[in-house]
Image: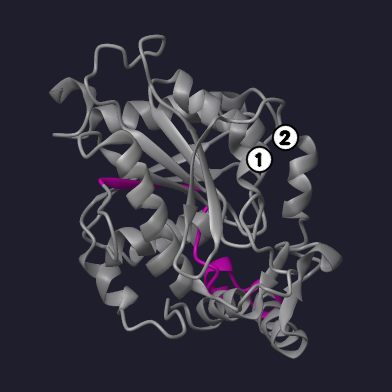
Amino acid sequence: MLTLMTQPEHAMAAARPEGELPLLTTVKTADGTRIPVRGLRAGPSTAASAVPSPPVVLVLPAMGTPARVYRHFARELHAAGLSVVTADLRGQGESTPRVTDPAARDHGFRTLLEQDFVAVLDAVRAEFGSGPPLFLLGHSLGGQLALLYAAAGPGPSVDGVVLVAAGSVWYRAYGAGRAPALLAGTTLIAATATLLGRWPGTRFGFGGNQTKGIMRDWARQGRTGRYRPAGSELDYESALRALAVPVLAVSVEHDTYAPASAVTHLVSKAPRAQVTRRHYTRHEAGARLDHFAWTRAGGALARGVAEWTAALPGLGRDSA
């Protein structure tokens, strides 16, 4: 598992583009967690100048990946005519407390979905108003969480979801050749996190430092294929089956973390959703791609996201 899926996601920060996105607000949750929210508002200088309420896209990061890694892609989305917002997952990037902080509490998917995302989306709606269509764009784990949030709707509703390099981690979705190692690896990671009290991902080169709750929820889905966040009273699998919003699911060339088969398993959980599939290639990007490299070569993808939102009935520019 660790040899097949080793990638220092936290190390992507070393390759981040210059220039921080403007700080819009800092969300403070009920338990004291602080999550800076940064972004760019579509205005007269963008392609959306003729649109009263350009769509707003909230970018949700991959596991262990700081939101600042997506700054370049966020600017590409903005140049394509979209308002764009980024926010770190709890304990990552700029958010506090960090997982290694003694004050940090254990948390899992439930806290992210039912507390943090609600607070961040409340802040986004306060910043941009109730008019603009609101989309979640999630990378890897961020994409899985985006789809779960859109389905269960514990807070402000969203108008659609964009999945980029985001697939189910169910071991059977990766084919017979990889399945045994993936099952063993996710089980080992969850056991290690439980034994140590957290997952020291910066030491092992996978996923960044994470709470045991996050890794156990993640591994449970990898083992069973089902999303059942510990401690949640919501039935996320039933909610996914009822989800009917538009979904753009983008697989990426040379992505071994989220191959097309894993993307297929994830979107198959939402049979009523209006799913559009796309494969982002090196030819389009003009650069080599993999699970992370697309963030530095996402201009064509950003334009494709903007075109997709514009074509949605009742939400796009043509209907404005």
As drawn, the residue found furthest toward the right would be 203
Instruction: State the extent of the magenta-drawn residues as a range.
Output: 159-181
SS under mark 1:
helix
Type of colouring: one colour
Report the residue at 57% width, 56% height from top: 258
Q: Give amino acid for label 2.
A: Arg
Give the camera-side residue of 279 and 239: 239
Q: Is residue 179 left or right of residue 238?
A: right
Q: Residue 119 location, x and y as percent? A: 39, 57
Asked if the stretch drawn in magenta spans residue 180, the answer is: yes
Give the class, few, some or many, for how many residues have Cα within 10 Å of label 1's Cα (few <14, many ≥20).
many
Image height check: is 168 above or below 127? below
Identify the residue at horizontal 54%, vertical 25% (top origin): 75
Q: Which of the two discs, 1 and 2, labels the residue nearer the N terminus?
A: 2
Q: Position of residue 174 (x, y in %)?
A: 58, 67
Give the vertical position of 1 relative to 296 (above or below).
below
Is the Cβ of the residue at disc 1 closer than 8 Å to that at disc 2? Answer: yes
Q: Disc 1 residue type?
A: Val
- Using the rendered image of the protein, determine whether residue 161 is visible from the camera's viewpoint: yes
Q: Residue at x 30, y 32 (%)?
A: 309
